Image (cartoon, grey):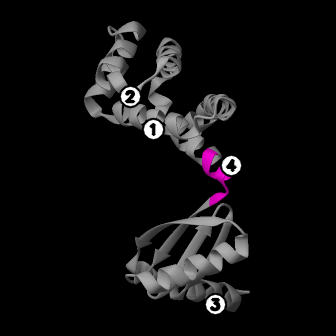
Amino acid sequence: MAEAITVARPYAEALYKLSLKNKNLSQWSKMLQFAAKIAEDKRIKMLIDNPRVSAEQISKLFFDIGKSNFDNEAHNFLTLLAENKRITILPQISQLYEQLKAQYEGILEAKITSAFEIDAKQLKKLIDDLEQKFNCKIEPKVSIDPELIGGIKVEIGDEVFDASVRGKLEAMTVALKS
């Protein structure tokens, strides 16, 4: 996974710069997400991994499936990836591109993990507080993890705010051992 991300980063950055220059960030976002879905399909993966299937055949397959979803630039990009045997990293390219786009638009993704379901009012209050703290728009990704016992855990970039019972118990364990 780390290798794929490392290989994908220059492609994502180049596409980001190109789309910024051409003012088509959202268009590239949609094209990359669509192409990534194609690349993740298990039947397509089998063809990509098959040494008898040429790069030309793989790129033609993507275009046949995508038809109206890809413009000429996307066509050239997918051909380049196929020729360099990099078509399998499309999901990572798409992910990195989305991060760059969100950063440009001033949006941070917050991974919010809760022990229990969070109602809309609580989530709105939490998001408002986070937006005020980080001074930008927050896009929440909420998940439930009963192992937290109670409370929530919020991850934004490299920062982690752990207000869960499990986190407090682990901190107490460390404090008691030292």
Image spot of residue 119 (x, y percent): 40, 84
**First-in-chain label (4 vs 1):** 1
Which residue is at a point 32% across and 8% down the rendered structure image? 52
Q: Which residue position is annotated with label 4?
A: 104
**First-in-chain label (1 vs 3):** 1
Q: Which mark is residue 172?
A: 3
**First-in-chain label (1 vs 2):** 1
Q: Are discs 4 and 2 less than 8 Å apart at CB?
A: no
Image spot of residue 80 (x, y percent): 53, 15
**First-in-chain label (4 vs 2):** 2
Q: Amino acid at mark 2?
A: Asn
Q: Are discs 1 and 2 less than 8 Å apart at CB?
A: yes
Callout 4: 10 Å neighbours few (<14), some, many (20+)?
few
Q: Which residue position is annotated with label 2?
A: 69
Callout 3: 10 Å neighbours few (<14), some, many (20+)?
few
Q: Amino acid at mark 1?
A: Lys
Q: Is residue 135 visible?
A: yes
**First-in-chain label (2 vs 3):** 2
Q: Which residue position is annotated with label 1?
A: 30
Q: Is residue 115 visible?
A: no
Q: Secondary structure at mark 4?
A: helix
